[in-house]
Image: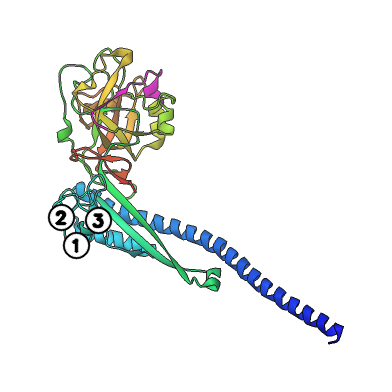
Amino acid sequence: MHPSSTSHGTRRADRGQILVIAAFGMIGLISMAALVLEGGNAYAQQRVVQNGTDAAANAGATVLARRLAGAALTDVDVAGAVTTIAGANSLDQEPAYYTDVQGRPIDVTGYVVGVDVAAKVGGGTIPTGAQGVGVRGTRTFGTFLGRAIGFNSFDASANATAITGRLVGGNFLPVVFPINIVDCNTNGDLGTGEAAWQLSQPGATGQHPTGVEYLVPLCKTGTGQFMILDLDVDMSCDEEVVTPPSVAFNIFPTFVNGDQGNDCLKKITEEVSKKTDRVYMIPICDVDCSTTGGGNAKYKIVRIAAFYVDYMSYQNGGNNNQCDPVATGLVAIAGNGSSSCMAGWFVRYVTRGPVGAGPIGNSDAIGVQLIQ
C-alpha cells in the first residue's frame, strides 16, 4: 500500500471522529442552554401560578368575609369568585375546599378533616364555622429549547389558603375610642354604648356613608392624658399618622401605652385633616379606658373599629363647637362630647390584615389574611 493512502485514510477517520465529538458537544450545549432557559421560564411560571392561586383563595375568603358582615351570600358566590379569578389567571383549578380560621380543612359540620374529604367549594353548602378557602392551581406551559431534548411542556402548581375573621392588626390611627366611658365632664353619663352603634353603608362614589354620623370624644377621664396611643416608641404621634406602623394584637384584651408627646392631638389632627373622607382602623377600649395613671397611662384595647372620618377637631384649635353635639346635631357616643373629638361613621369594612378567632362584634372590622 502506498504510504500516502494510509495517511489520507487516517485523516478521514480523524475528521469523522471530530464530527461525532462536535455533534455530541452541540447536543451538550443545547441541553445546557435548554436547562438555563427552561429553568428561568419555569421559575417565572411558578410565580405567576402562585400569584394567581393566592388571588383565587383571597377572592373566596373575601366572599366569606362579606358573609360574616351580614351579606346574603352562598356557596355559589364563593365558587364563582374562586373560579373567576382562577380562570383569569389561566389556572387549571382542582376543587377548592373550606377551612376554619386556622386554615385547617373542615367537613360540612365544621369538623377538622383531611383535604381529600373536606367540604368542597361549589358543593352546595358553606360549612358551619367556615372562615377560609384553600385552593390548588396548576398551569401547563410549553417549552422553548426544551423541545430539542424531548421536553415539550411542564406543569407549575401552587397551593394557597386565605382566611377571614375579626381584624386583630393593621395600620391604625394612634387614637382610641371608648365603648362606654364617663363623658368628659365626668358626670357619670355613659352615653351611647358600642352595642347601639349603627353601622353605615357605603355611599355613592364621592359621597359620605349612609347612616348615623357619630361624634366621638377624645378626652381624659381623670388626671391622665388625652386618648392618644403610642403604637411605635420610635415614631412621633404625627409620624404614626403619616406612615402608620403595622401592628398586630395577638390577643384581646391587650394594653397599649398612651403617648406622652407634646401637643400630640393638635399634630395628629393636622395630619388627619389632609386625609379625611377615608376609613381608618381605630382601636377601641372598654370601661377600663381610665387614664388615671397620669403619664404612665395604659389603655385596655378590646377590639378594632373601622371608622370613616369626616373631620377631627383638637382642643384650643379655634373650632371647639365642632365637638358639641348640640351645635353639630351629631350623635355623641359618650355624654356631651368634648373640646377634642372625631366625627364620622362606623362601617363594616373588609380589609387585608391579620385576623383572629371569635365572634364578630357590632363594630369589629373584618380582615382577610393569606396564610399559605
Q: CA distance from mark 3 to mark 1?
A: 14 Å
> Residue 61: percent from the left, percent from the top?
27, 51
Spot the residue most to the bottom: 1
Kind of residue sitting beneath label 2: Val
Residue 178 quadrant = top left
Q: Residues within 10 Å of mark 2 (few under 14, many from 20)?
A: some
Specify the quadrant that holds the N terminus.
Answer: bottom right
Q: Are marks 2 and 3 in contact (CB under 8 Å)?
A: no
Q: Are marks 1 and 2 in contact (CB under 8 Å)?
A: yes
> Residue 261: percent from the left, percent from the top?
40, 19
Front-most of 113 and 22?
Answer: 22
Q: Residue at x 52, y 60 (%)?
A: 39
Residue 90 quadrant = bottom left
Q: Of discs 3 and 1, which sits in the foreground?
A: 3
Q: Residue at x 23, y 59 (%)?
A: 116
Q: Which residue is mark 3?
A: 115
Q: Residues within 10 Å of mark 1 (few under 14, many from 20)?
A: some
Q: Residue at x 24, y 17 (%)?
A: 221
Disc nearer the start of the sequence (1/2)? 2
Kind of residue sitting beneath label 3: Val
| 296 displayed left or right of 148 | left
Disc nearer the start of the sequence (3/1)? 3
Figure check: 142 above or below 176? below
| 141 displayed left or right of 212 | right
Residue 204 visible in rendering: no
Kind of residue sitting beneath label 1: Gly
| 355 displayed left or right of 271 | left
Figure check: 246 above or below 208? above
Q: Which residue is mark 2?
A: 108
Disc nearer the start of the sequence (2/3)? 2
Magenta stretch bounds: 251-267
